[in-house]
Protein backbone atom coordinates (compact mmCIF):
# COMPACT_ATOMS: atom_id res chain seq x y z
CA UNK A 1 0.00 0.00 0.00
CA UNK A 2 1.40 3.41 -0.99
CA UNK A 3 1.93 6.15 1.57
CA UNK A 4 -0.75 8.25 -0.11
CA UNK A 5 -3.33 5.47 0.28
CA UNK A 6 -2.34 4.95 3.91
CA UNK A 7 -2.71 8.64 4.62
CA UNK A 8 -6.14 8.77 2.97
CA UNK A 9 -7.26 5.80 5.11
CA UNK A 10 -5.87 7.53 8.18
CA UNK A 11 -7.87 10.66 7.48
CA UNK A 12 -11.04 8.52 7.19
CA UNK A 13 -10.08 6.18 10.02
CA UNK A 14 -13.34 6.70 11.97
CA UNK A 15 -15.48 5.42 9.13
CA UNK A 16 -13.04 2.89 7.70
CA UNK A 17 -11.44 1.49 10.87
CA UNK A 18 -12.86 2.55 14.21
CA UNK A 19 -16.57 2.14 13.44
CA UNK A 20 -16.15 -1.33 11.85
CA UNK A 21 -14.12 -2.46 14.87
CA UNK A 22 -16.85 -1.27 17.24
CA UNK A 23 -19.52 -3.03 15.18
CA UNK A 24 -17.48 -6.24 14.99
CA UNK A 25 -16.97 -6.06 18.77
CA UNK A 26 -20.70 -5.75 19.38
CA UNK A 27 -21.44 -8.66 17.01
CA UNK A 28 -18.74 -10.81 18.64
CA UNK A 29 -20.18 -10.20 22.11
CA UNK A 30 -23.67 -11.00 20.82
CA UNK A 31 -22.40 -14.23 19.20
CA UNK A 32 -20.61 -15.28 22.40
CA UNK A 33 -23.72 -14.58 24.47
CA UNK A 34 -25.90 -16.66 22.12
CA UNK A 35 -23.62 -19.57 21.15
CA UNK A 36 -20.37 -19.85 23.09
CA UNK A 37 -21.47 -18.74 26.58
CA UNK A 38 -25.27 -18.45 26.49
CA UNK A 39 -26.97 -17.53 29.71
CA UNK A 40 -29.31 -20.24 31.02
CA UNK A 41 -33.06 -19.68 30.88
CA UNK A 42 -34.67 -18.07 33.89
CA UNK A 43 -37.44 -20.69 34.05
CA UNK A 44 -37.93 -24.43 33.69
CA UNK A 45 -41.03 -26.53 32.96
CA UNK A 46 -41.44 -29.79 34.87
CA UNK A 47 -43.67 -32.60 33.59
CA UNK A 48 -45.21 -34.65 36.41
CA UNK A 49 -48.10 -36.69 35.01
CA UNK A 50 -51.28 -36.59 37.12
CA UNK A 51 -51.74 -33.61 39.42
CA UNK A 52 -52.36 -35.71 42.56
CA UNK A 53 -49.46 -38.12 42.07
CA UNK A 54 -46.11 -38.51 43.80
CA UNK A 55 -44.24 -36.69 41.01
CA UNK A 56 -46.38 -33.61 41.56
CA UNK A 57 -45.35 -33.58 45.22
CA UNK A 58 -41.67 -33.81 44.27
CA UNK A 59 -42.14 -31.02 41.74
CA UNK A 60 -43.55 -28.75 44.44
CA UNK A 61 -40.39 -29.29 46.50
CA UNK A 62 -38.26 -28.55 43.43
CA UNK A 63 -40.24 -25.39 42.77
CA UNK A 64 -39.48 -24.06 46.24
CA UNK A 65 -35.76 -24.83 45.97
CA UNK A 66 -35.31 -23.53 42.43
CA UNK A 67 -37.21 -20.31 43.06
CA UNK A 68 -34.78 -19.60 45.90
CA UNK A 69 -32.09 -19.76 43.24
CA UNK A 70 -33.97 -17.32 41.03
CA UNK A 71 -35.40 -19.92 38.62
CA UNK A 72 -39.14 -19.88 37.98
CA UNK A 73 -40.81 -23.29 37.75
CA UNK A 74 -43.91 -24.22 35.76
CA UNK A 75 -45.44 -27.61 36.58
CA UNK A 76 -47.25 -29.35 33.71
CA UNK A 77 -49.75 -32.08 34.55
CA UNK A 78 -51.85 -34.51 32.52
CA UNK A 79 -55.41 -34.71 33.91
CA UNK A 80 -56.03 -38.23 32.69
CA UNK A 81 -52.45 -39.43 33.08
CA UNK A 82 -52.34 -40.58 29.46
CA UNK A 83 -49.43 -38.30 28.59
CA UNK A 84 -46.63 -39.03 31.04
CA UNK A 85 -43.39 -37.09 31.56
CA UNK A 86 -41.41 -39.37 29.25
CA UNK A 87 -43.89 -38.88 26.41
CA UNK A 88 -43.87 -35.12 26.95
CA UNK A 89 -40.08 -34.88 26.97
CA UNK A 90 -39.83 -37.01 23.83
CA UNK A 91 -42.31 -34.80 21.95
CA UNK A 92 -40.34 -31.99 20.21
CA UNK A 93 -43.22 -29.52 20.36
CA UNK A 94 -43.98 -29.97 24.04
CA UNK A 95 -42.99 -27.21 26.46
CA UNK A 96 -41.63 -29.61 29.08
CA UNK A 97 -37.89 -29.43 29.78
CA UNK A 98 -37.53 -31.83 32.71
CA UNK A 99 -39.57 -34.46 34.46
CA UNK A 100 -39.62 -37.64 36.54
CA UNK A 101 -40.01 -41.27 35.55
CA UNK A 102 -39.20 -44.69 36.94
CA UNK A 103 -36.57 -46.87 35.36
CA UNK A 104 -38.97 -49.35 33.77
CA UNK A 105 -39.77 -46.66 31.18
CA UNK A 106 -36.10 -46.28 30.27
CA UNK A 107 -34.79 -46.44 26.76
CA UNK A 108 -31.13 -46.41 25.78
CA UNK A 109 -31.85 -44.80 22.42
CA UNK A 110 -29.87 -41.50 22.20
CA UNK A 111 -32.27 -40.33 19.49
CA UNK A 112 -35.04 -40.07 22.07
CA UNK A 113 -33.59 -36.75 23.20
CA UNK A 114 -33.97 -37.67 26.90
CA UNK A 115 -31.17 -38.01 29.41
CA UNK A 116 -31.09 -38.72 33.13
CA UNK A 117 -29.46 -36.41 35.63
CA UNK A 118 -29.68 -38.86 38.54
CA UNK A 119 -31.72 -41.46 40.33
CA UNK A 120 -33.43 -39.57 43.14
CA UNK A 121 -35.25 -42.32 45.02
CA UNK A 122 -36.93 -45.71 45.09
CA UNK A 123 -40.29 -46.58 43.58
CA UNK A 124 -41.24 -49.96 45.00
CA UNK A 125 -43.70 -52.28 43.34
CA UNK A 126 -46.53 -52.38 45.89
CA UNK A 127 -49.13 -55.11 45.95
CA UNK A 128 -52.22 -54.40 48.09
CA UNK A 129 -55.22 -56.60 48.80
CA UNK A 130 -58.14 -56.56 51.20
CA UNK A 131 -58.10 -60.37 51.61
CA UNK A 132 -56.37 -61.28 54.85
CA UNK A 133 -55.97 -64.84 53.64
CA UNK A 134 -53.99 -63.81 50.55
CA UNK A 135 -50.43 -64.08 51.81
CA UNK A 136 -48.71 -64.70 48.48
CA UNK A 137 -49.04 -63.69 44.85
CA UNK A 138 -50.00 -67.22 43.84
CA UNK A 139 -53.28 -66.71 45.70
CA UNK A 140 -54.34 -63.89 43.32
CA UNK A 141 -55.48 -66.48 40.78
CA UNK A 142 -59.09 -65.90 39.63
CA UNK A 143 -59.30 -62.54 41.44
CA UNK A 144 -59.93 -59.01 40.15
CA UNK A 145 -56.62 -57.14 39.94
CA UNK A 146 -56.03 -53.51 38.97
CA UNK A 147 -52.65 -52.85 37.37
CA UNK A 148 -53.24 -50.09 34.86
CA UNK A 149 -53.94 -50.40 31.14
CA UNK A 150 -52.51 -53.19 29.01
CA UNK A 151 -48.97 -52.37 27.87
CA UNK A 152 -48.30 -50.06 30.82
CA UNK A 153 -45.18 -50.71 32.88
CA UNK A 154 -47.23 -51.52 36.00
CA UNK A 155 -49.19 -54.18 34.10
CA UNK A 156 -45.99 -55.65 32.66
CA UNK A 157 -44.40 -55.94 36.09
CA UNK A 158 -47.58 -57.44 37.51
CA UNK A 159 -47.58 -60.08 34.77
CA UNK A 160 -43.94 -60.91 35.51
CA UNK A 161 -44.54 -61.16 39.26
CA UNK A 162 -47.57 -63.38 38.81
CA UNK A 163 -45.71 -65.49 36.29
CA UNK A 164 -42.96 -65.98 38.86
CA UNK A 165 -45.73 -67.21 41.20
CA UNK A 166 -47.00 -69.64 38.51
CA UNK A 167 -50.10 -67.55 37.77
CA UNK A 168 -50.89 -67.05 34.09
CA UNK A 169 -52.21 -63.65 32.88
CA UNK A 170 -55.39 -65.35 31.64
CA UNK A 171 -56.08 -66.60 35.17
CA UNK A 172 -56.56 -63.04 36.46
CA UNK A 173 -59.38 -60.59 35.79
CA UNK A 174 -57.49 -57.41 34.87
CA UNK A 175 -58.89 -53.95 35.43
CA UNK A 176 -57.29 -50.98 33.64
CA UNK A 177 -57.82 -48.51 36.45
CA UNK A 178 -54.92 -47.23 38.53
CA UNK A 179 -53.91 -44.57 41.02
CA UNK A 180 -56.39 -43.18 43.51
CA UNK A 181 -59.49 -44.36 41.56
CA UNK A 182 -58.27 -47.96 41.79
CA UNK A 183 -57.33 -47.45 45.44
CA UNK A 184 -60.88 -46.33 46.22
CA UNK A 185 -62.24 -49.38 44.41
CA UNK A 186 -60.01 -51.57 46.56
CA UNK A 187 -61.17 -49.85 49.75
CA UNK A 188 -64.77 -50.36 48.64
CA UNK A 189 -64.06 -54.07 48.00
CA UNK A 190 -64.98 -53.82 44.32
CA UNK A 191 -61.61 -55.24 43.31
CA UNK A 192 -59.47 -57.80 45.11
CA UNK A 193 -55.92 -56.53 44.64
CA UNK A 194 -53.93 -53.72 43.17
CA UNK A 195 -50.39 -53.27 41.81
CA UNK A 196 -48.80 -49.84 42.22
CA UNK A 197 -45.37 -48.48 41.27
CA UNK A 198 -44.75 -45.42 43.41
CA UNK A 199 -42.67 -43.83 46.13
CA UNK A 200 -43.56 -44.21 49.78
CA UNK A 201 -44.92 -40.64 49.78
CA UNK A 202 -47.23 -41.03 46.78
CA UNK A 203 -50.90 -40.42 47.69
CA UNK A 204 -51.99 -43.89 46.59
CA UNK A 205 -49.34 -45.68 48.65
CA UNK A 206 -49.91 -43.47 51.69
CA UNK A 207 -53.64 -44.12 51.56
CA UNK A 208 -53.52 -47.89 51.13
CA UNK A 209 -50.56 -48.62 53.42
CA UNK A 210 -52.31 -46.92 56.34
CA UNK A 211 -55.87 -48.03 55.69
CA UNK A 212 -57.25 -50.71 58.05
CA UNK A 213 -58.18 -53.93 56.33
CA UNK A 214 -55.63 -53.46 53.53
CA UNK A 215 -52.63 -55.78 53.43
CA UNK A 216 -49.29 -55.59 51.62
CA UNK A 217 -47.78 -58.59 49.87
CA UNK A 218 -44.11 -59.40 49.43
CA UNK A 219 -42.39 -61.09 46.49
CA UNK A 220 -40.91 -64.55 46.58
CA UNK A 221 -37.74 -65.41 44.63
CA UNK A 222 -37.14 -61.72 43.95
CA UNK A 223 -33.53 -62.28 42.87
CA UNK A 224 -34.63 -64.64 40.13
CA UNK A 225 -36.92 -61.97 38.71
CA UNK A 226 -34.30 -59.22 38.88
CA UNK A 227 -31.88 -61.43 36.96
CA UNK A 228 -34.29 -61.26 34.03
CA UNK A 229 -35.24 -57.59 34.57
CA UNK A 230 -32.15 -55.59 35.67
CA UNK A 231 -34.21 -52.41 36.01
CA UNK A 232 -35.78 -53.97 39.11
CA UNK A 233 -33.83 -54.45 42.34
CA UNK A 234 -34.80 -56.35 45.51
CA UNK A 235 -34.90 -54.82 48.97
CA UNK A 236 -36.38 -55.64 52.36
CA UNK A 237 -39.03 -53.36 53.85
CA UNK A 238 -38.51 -53.85 57.61
CA UNK A 239 -41.37 -54.52 59.98
CA UNK A 240 -42.83 -51.27 61.35
CA UNK A 241 -40.76 -49.07 59.04
CA UNK A 242 -43.78 -47.19 57.65
CA UNK A 243 -45.42 -46.67 61.05
CA UNK A 244 -43.74 -48.08 64.12
CA UNK A 245 -46.70 -47.54 66.49
CA UNK A 246 -49.19 -49.20 64.15
CA UNK A 247 -46.64 -51.89 63.17
CA UNK A 248 -46.88 -51.22 59.42
CA UNK A 249 -45.93 -53.51 57.83
CA UNK A 250 -46.51 -56.26 60.43
CA UNK A 251 -43.54 -58.31 59.13
CA UNK A 252 -40.45 -57.91 56.96
CA UNK A 253 -41.40 -57.87 53.28
CA UNK A 254 -39.13 -58.65 50.34
CA UNK A 255 -40.06 -56.23 47.62
CA UNK A 256 -38.81 -54.94 44.29
CA UNK A 257 -38.13 -51.37 43.34
CA UNK A 258 -37.16 -49.33 40.31
CA UNK A 259 -35.31 -46.05 40.49
CA UNK A 260 -37.03 -42.68 40.25
CA UNK A 261 -35.15 -40.73 37.58
CA UNK A 262 -34.80 -37.00 37.16
CA UNK A 263 -34.94 -36.53 33.39
CA UNK A 264 -34.08 -33.62 31.12
CA UNK A 265 -33.92 -32.94 27.44
CA UNK A 266 -30.45 -33.26 25.95
CA UNK A 267 -30.52 -29.61 24.83
CA UNK A 268 -31.00 -28.21 28.36
CA UNK A 269 -28.38 -25.66 29.39
CA UNK A 270 -25.63 -27.30 31.52
CA UNK A 271 -25.94 -24.62 34.22
CA UNK A 272 -29.65 -25.35 34.57
CA UNK A 273 -28.87 -29.07 34.79
CA UNK A 274 -26.44 -28.36 37.62
CA UNK A 275 -29.09 -26.26 39.37
CA UNK A 276 -31.49 -29.22 39.15
CA UNK A 277 -28.80 -31.53 40.52
CA UNK A 278 -28.15 -29.15 43.42
CA UNK A 279 -31.87 -29.15 44.10
CA UNK A 280 -31.98 -32.95 43.93
CA UNK A 281 -29.10 -33.18 46.40
CA UNK A 282 -30.79 -30.81 48.84
CA UNK A 283 -34.18 -32.53 48.48
CA UNK A 284 -33.37 -36.25 48.41
CA UNK A 285 -30.31 -36.65 50.62
CA UNK A 286 -32.44 -36.84 53.79
CA UNK A 287 -33.29 -40.34 55.05
CA UNK A 288 -36.75 -41.90 54.83
CA UNK A 289 -38.08 -45.36 55.58
CA UNK A 290 -37.03 -46.33 52.04
CA UNK A 291 -33.54 -44.86 51.94
CA UNK A 292 -30.48 -44.04 54.00
CA UNK A 293 -28.84 -40.67 54.59
CA UNK A 294 -27.18 -39.40 51.37
CA UNK A 295 -28.14 -42.55 49.45
CA UNK A 296 -29.56 -40.34 46.73
CA UNK A 297 -28.96 -38.80 44.25
CA UNK A 298 -27.32 -41.80 42.63
CA UNK A 299 -25.85 -41.84 39.13
CA UNK A 300 -26.32 -45.49 38.16
CA UNK A 301 -29.23 -44.76 35.84
CA UNK A 302 -31.38 -46.83 33.52
CA UNK A 303 -31.74 -43.88 31.14
CA UNK A 304 -28.64 -42.52 29.35
CA UNK A 305 -26.76 -40.31 31.80
CA UNK A 306 -26.21 -36.66 30.90
CA UNK A 307 -22.52 -35.65 30.37
CA UNK A 308 -23.13 -32.74 32.72
CA UNK A 309 -24.31 -35.17 35.40
CA UNK A 310 -21.19 -37.30 34.88
CA UNK A 311 -18.97 -34.30 35.58
CA UNK A 312 -21.17 -33.29 38.53
CA UNK A 313 -20.91 -36.80 40.00
CA UNK A 314 -17.10 -36.53 39.84
CA UNK A 315 -17.18 -33.16 41.62
CA UNK A 316 -16.35 -31.18 38.48
CA UNK A 317 -18.16 -27.91 37.96
CA UNK A 318 -17.18 -24.35 36.96
CA UNK A 319 -15.12 -22.65 39.64
CA UNK A 320 -17.32 -19.56 39.53
CA UNK A 321 -20.38 -21.60 40.56
CA UNK A 322 -18.52 -22.65 43.70
CA UNK A 323 -17.78 -19.05 44.67
CA UNK A 324 -20.86 -17.12 43.48
CA UNK A 325 -24.65 -17.51 43.55
CA UNK A 326 -26.24 -19.18 40.55
CA UNK A 327 -27.08 -16.17 38.38
CA UNK A 328 -23.98 -14.17 39.32
CA UNK A 329 -21.82 -17.14 38.34
CA UNK A 330 -23.36 -17.31 34.86
CA UNK A 331 -22.97 -13.56 34.29
CA UNK A 332 -19.39 -13.65 35.56
CA UNK A 333 -18.56 -16.51 33.18
CA UNK A 334 -19.91 -14.52 30.23
CA UNK A 335 -18.02 -11.39 31.27
CA UNK A 336 -14.70 -13.08 32.08
CA UNK A 337 -14.49 -15.51 29.19
CA UNK A 338 -16.29 -13.63 26.42
CA UNK A 339 -17.04 -9.95 26.95
CA UNK A 340 -13.73 -8.85 28.51
CA UNK A 341 -11.47 -10.72 26.02
CA UNK A 342 -13.42 -9.33 23.05
CA UNK A 343 -13.29 -5.81 24.46
CA UNK A 344 -9.56 -6.20 25.18
CA UNK A 345 -8.92 -7.24 21.58
CA UNK A 346 -11.03 -4.34 20.32
CA UNK A 347 -9.15 -1.83 22.49
CA UNK A 348 -5.84 -3.27 21.32
CA UNK A 349 -6.96 -2.86 17.70
CA UNK A 350 -8.11 0.71 18.30
CA UNK A 351 -4.75 1.54 19.90
CA UNK A 352 -2.76 -0.30 17.26
CA UNK A 353 -4.31 1.47 14.27
CA UNK A 354 -2.81 4.93 15.03
CA UNK A 355 0.49 3.25 15.80
CA UNK A 356 0.35 1.47 12.45
CA UNK A 357 -0.13 4.77 10.65
CA UNK A 358 2.65 6.33 12.74
CA UNK A 359 4.98 3.51 11.74
CA UNK A 360 4.05 3.98 8.10
CA UNK A 361 4.63 7.76 8.25
CA UNK A 362 7.89 7.15 10.12
CA UNK A 363 8.95 4.81 7.35
CA UNK A 364 8.14 7.44 4.70
CA UNK A 365 10.03 10.18 6.51
CA UNK A 366 12.92 7.80 7.27
CA UNK A 367 13.11 7.04 3.56
CA UNK A 368 13.58 10.70 2.67
CA UNK A 369 16.06 11.22 5.50
CA UNK A 370 18.03 8.25 4.18
CA UNK A 371 17.98 9.65 0.65
CA UNK A 372 19.08 13.04 2.01
CA UNK A 373 21.94 11.42 3.91
CA UNK A 374 23.15 9.66 0.76
CA UNK A 375 22.86 12.91 -1.15
CA UNK A 376 24.95 14.77 1.44
CA UNK A 377 27.62 12.09 1.29
CA UNK A 378 27.72 12.33 -2.50
CA UNK A 379 27.80 16.09 -2.20
CA UNK A 380 31.10 16.09 -0.31
CA UNK A 381 32.64 13.51 -2.62
CA UNK A 382 31.56 15.20 -5.86
CA UNK A 383 32.65 18.66 -4.62
CA UNK A 384 36.27 17.53 -4.41
CA UNK A 385 36.44 14.95 -7.19
CA UNK A 386 33.77 15.70 -9.84
CA UNK A 387 32.23 19.17 -9.48
CA UNK A 388 30.34 18.70 -12.77
CA UNK A 389 28.18 16.02 -11.11
CA UNK A 390 26.80 18.54 -8.60
CA UNK A 391 24.19 19.56 -11.14
CA UNK A 392 22.74 16.03 -11.09
CA UNK A 393 22.55 16.20 -7.34
CA UNK A 394 20.68 19.48 -7.61
CA UNK A 395 18.12 17.86 -9.90
CA UNK A 396 17.71 14.97 -7.46
CA UNK A 397 17.32 17.41 -4.57
CA UNK A 398 14.67 19.35 -6.48
CA UNK A 399 12.75 16.12 -7.06
CA UNK A 400 12.93 15.21 -3.37
CA UNK A 401 11.67 18.66 -2.37
CA UNK A 402 8.72 18.33 -4.72
CA UNK A 403 7.83 14.88 -3.36
CA UNK A 404 8.11 16.04 0.26
CA UNK A 405 6.08 19.17 -0.45
CA UNK A 406 3.32 17.02 -1.99
CA UNK A 407 3.04 14.78 1.08
CA UNK A 408 -0.39 15.28 2.66
CA UNK A 409 0.49 14.24 6.18
CA UNK A 410 -1.91 14.48 9.14
CA UNK A 411 -1.56 17.58 11.26
CA UNK A 412 0.15 15.78 14.12
CA UNK A 413 3.10 15.05 11.83
CA UNK A 414 3.45 18.65 10.62
CA UNK A 415 6.41 19.45 12.88
CA UNK A 416 8.41 16.54 11.48
CA UNK A 417 7.39 17.48 7.96
CA UNK A 418 8.63 21.05 8.44
CA UNK A 419 11.86 19.75 9.99
CA UNK A 420 12.49 17.56 6.93
CA UNK A 421 11.90 20.48 4.62
CA UNK A 422 14.34 22.59 6.64
CA UNK A 423 16.99 19.90 6.20
CA UNK A 424 16.31 19.88 2.47
CA UNK A 425 16.64 23.66 2.32
CA UNK A 426 19.93 23.45 4.23
CA UNK A 427 21.18 20.80 1.81
CA UNK A 428 20.22 23.01 -1.15
CA UNK A 429 22.10 25.97 0.34
CA UNK A 430 25.14 23.77 0.90
CA UNK A 431 24.94 22.47 -2.67
CA UNK A 432 24.62 25.95 -4.17
CA UNK A 433 27.55 27.17 -2.08
CA UNK A 434 29.75 24.38 -3.37
CA UNK A 435 28.74 25.02 -7.01
CA UNK A 436 29.57 28.73 -6.68
CA UNK A 437 33.21 28.11 -5.80
Image: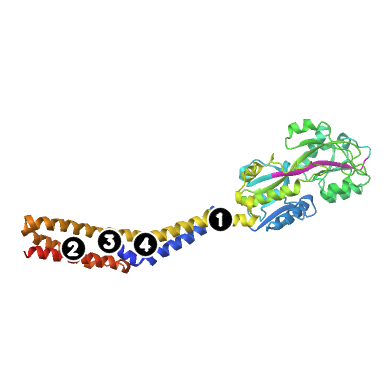
Q: Which residues are magenta?
A: 118-131
Q: What is the distance, in whole Å, between disc 3 and disc 1 at their CAs?
A: 42 Å
Q: Residue 297 falls in which quadrant of the image?
A: top right
Q: Which mark is residue 283?
A: none
Residue 395 in view in this figure: yes
- The residue drawn where x is 25% and y is 68% is 418
Q: Which residue is mark 3?
A: 3
Residue 76 figure quarter? bottom right
Q: Quadrant of the N terminus?
A: bottom left
In the displayed structure, 267 sits above or below 125; it is below
Q: How far apart in space, not on screen, are marks 4 and 2 (Cα)?
A: 26 Å
The residue that disc 4 covers is 354
The residue that disc 2 covers is: 400
Classify 10 Å Cα crowding around label 3: few (below 14), some (14-19), many (20 and above): some
Does label 4 or label 3 sit earlier along the sequence? 3
- Going from N to C along the chain, the mark reached first, 2 or 1, is 1
Counting residues from the N terminus, which is met first, the one under dot 3 or under dot 2? 3
Q: Tell which of 307 and 231 is nearer to you.
A: 307
Amino acid sequence: MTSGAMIRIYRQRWGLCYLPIVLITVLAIWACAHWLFPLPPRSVTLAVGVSNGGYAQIAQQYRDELERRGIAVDIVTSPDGALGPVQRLAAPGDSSQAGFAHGLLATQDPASGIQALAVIGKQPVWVFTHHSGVIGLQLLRNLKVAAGPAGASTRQVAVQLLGQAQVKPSEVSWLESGGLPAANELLERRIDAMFVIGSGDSPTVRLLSRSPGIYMLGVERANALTAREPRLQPFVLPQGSIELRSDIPPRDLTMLYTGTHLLVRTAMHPALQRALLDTATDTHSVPTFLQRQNEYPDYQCDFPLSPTAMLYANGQRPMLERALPYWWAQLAELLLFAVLPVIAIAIAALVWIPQLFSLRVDAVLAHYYGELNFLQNDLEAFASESPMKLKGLLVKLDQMEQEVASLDLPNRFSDRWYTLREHLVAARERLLTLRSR
